Amino acid sequence: MSVARLLWVGWRFHFKSLTLSGFFLITTVFGPALIATIAYYMFKTGQRPGTLFYASLGSAVYGIWSATLFGSGGALAWQRWQGTLEVVVSTPTPLLLIVLPLTLSTSSIGLYSLASTLIWGRVVFGIPFQIAHPLAFVVAVPATILGLGLLGVVLASTFILYRHANALSNMLEWPVLLVTGLLVPLSLLPGWSHPIAWVLAPTWGVRAIRGAALGGNPWPSTAVTLGLGLAYLVIGAVCLRYVELAARKQATLSLT
Amino acid sequence: MTGLRIFFIGGVTSYRALFNWLSPWIFVPTFLVAPIFQILLFVYIGRSAGVQSDEFYVIGNALQYAAIPCIFAMSNTIAGERFQQTLGYILATPAGRLPLFVGRSLPVIVNGMGVSAFALVVGGAIVGIHVPASSVGALALVIAISAFACTGLGLVSAAIGLLARDTATLNNIVFGLLLVFTGANVPLHELPGWMSTIAQGLPLTHGIEAARRLAEGASLSSVDRLVGAEALVGVLYAFVGYLFLTAMEWQSRNRATLERL
């Protein structure tokens, strides 16, 4: 019960806190709408208007990815900068239970990008918003958010090893957008990039959301998204434990 | 003579002290790797949409990426003084404001040129575009002028940074708008009229167009109006930025907001 309460309170606190951040609002609302705008014009020029809703959904998942990448990637680094990392680590609560609601909240604010991108596409470009399988859509969206939030645990626990986590986040934003097929079909990309796509939750998350919205069977992709999430949680927990122990042993916890 | 010293030495010193990306751990991922992936992303979206050539996206995004060093770094080299609590000392000196502020832009322009040129060469090599050897010199000139024009906009952003708190958010918005409006990925004639009209007054728009024509084999003299327009846009932004900076200095003295973080 106390674990559930901790997760809920932590998620709610970080969600509200991120909502008040201008940077994260720009990342989740403005950035995806901008990418969607460019994609709309490119697809319209190419006389492929049927792909506009496809691009819209891809841009929305990009917003979730972007928020997770910057929020979770810098999560521990920010705690370090603000001088709260030692306090957090020294509490009796396992570090994982403190980091988890944080990373889940970063992917959860991606809901803003989903809403804003779809509204932007509807209002400005007149893209019809029709969901083929509403129930599957309602399941696919939280599953994608959960999958990416758990990927955030891996990002949080590994980016801390790189002193300039923000630079790493900047570098990874476009490659993952490209390789996971959010805007470009995977079949157009080189074959060697496909295995990379398969182990990344956004690939399956966007497939699930598109399957639910455009028609198709979204359930296998939803299941893979959740399965990958579980794997991320295990990997993240191990990495977090390793990083925490190493930082305690070497007394590098508070170094900025 | 003192003005020249402030312009060159002051500019280089502030660049070394306040340019947060000088560490290779930041410089390489941010300025060398990220623009290549931006190019690849739009090349593949273009292929998927069945529009434009690879060359279109390589040139557009290579030049547009100069906005990252030019806008972010320019505003950082001034807003960074406030963050370090040294702005008051600098503005208390009798140094001329023109060499003081504009001198900081020179290393930023060189940086922006380097980033654009690297992205163009490496991105072009990966995708496999061909640029005639005779166009290389003219392209370098266009890249330099585009970086200068973009730094002019960075100067305006730096001035706003003296009043606003969060320059990073502002600069992200500016970068995003340049990605859409300058024709880096969508030809201006495909954009609505009001957007292409605004684009005429933005840095990079004319530079990108000139670079594309040069890459197709046009001579420098045939794009001189575009190059001139890009330079004019740069001069106007630099002038407005300088006026803004002096006005903001007065304002921040008046309201005692000089050191507000």
Image: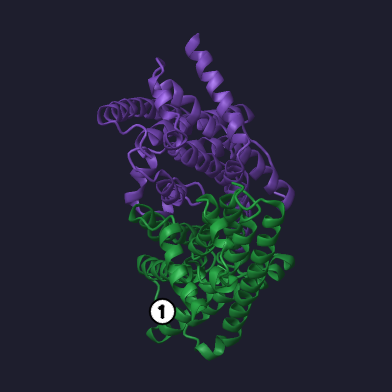
Chain colours: A purple, B green
Q: Is residue B142 above or below residue A242?
A: below
Bin the neighbour count of mark 1 within 10 Å (Cα to Cα): few under 14, some 14-19, many 20 and up. some
Viewer-proximal residue among B94 and A74: B94
Tell me the residue that label 1 is attached to: B131
Q: Position of residue B160 (x, y in %)?
A: 65, 58
Q: Is residue B10 above or below residue A68?
A: below
| Marker count (numbered) | 1
Q: Most extreme residue toward the bottom, as rendered? A: B221
Residue sitting at x 49%, y 72%: B6
Does the image show residue B94?
Answer: yes
Residue sitting at x 40%, y 30%: A228
Quarter assignment of residue A188: bottom left
Viewer-proximal residue among A83 and B225: A83
Q: Which amino acid type corresponds to the residue marked 1 in the rendered image? A: Val
Quarter assignment of residue B133: bottom left
Q: Is residue A95 left or right of residue B186?
A: left
Q: Position of residue B210 (x, y in %)?
A: 54, 79
The quadrant of the rendering that contains the C terminus of chain A is top left
- The chain carrying label 1 is B
Q: Is residue A232 above or below residue B206?
A: above
Does the image show residue B116?
Answer: no
Query: Please, what secondary structure does the residue beneath circle 1 have?
Result: loop
Q: Position of residue B192 (x, y in %)?
A: 71, 65
Q: Is residue B35 above or below residue A223?
A: below
Q: Position of residue A176 (x, y in %)?
A: 43, 47
Quarter assignment of residue A232: top left
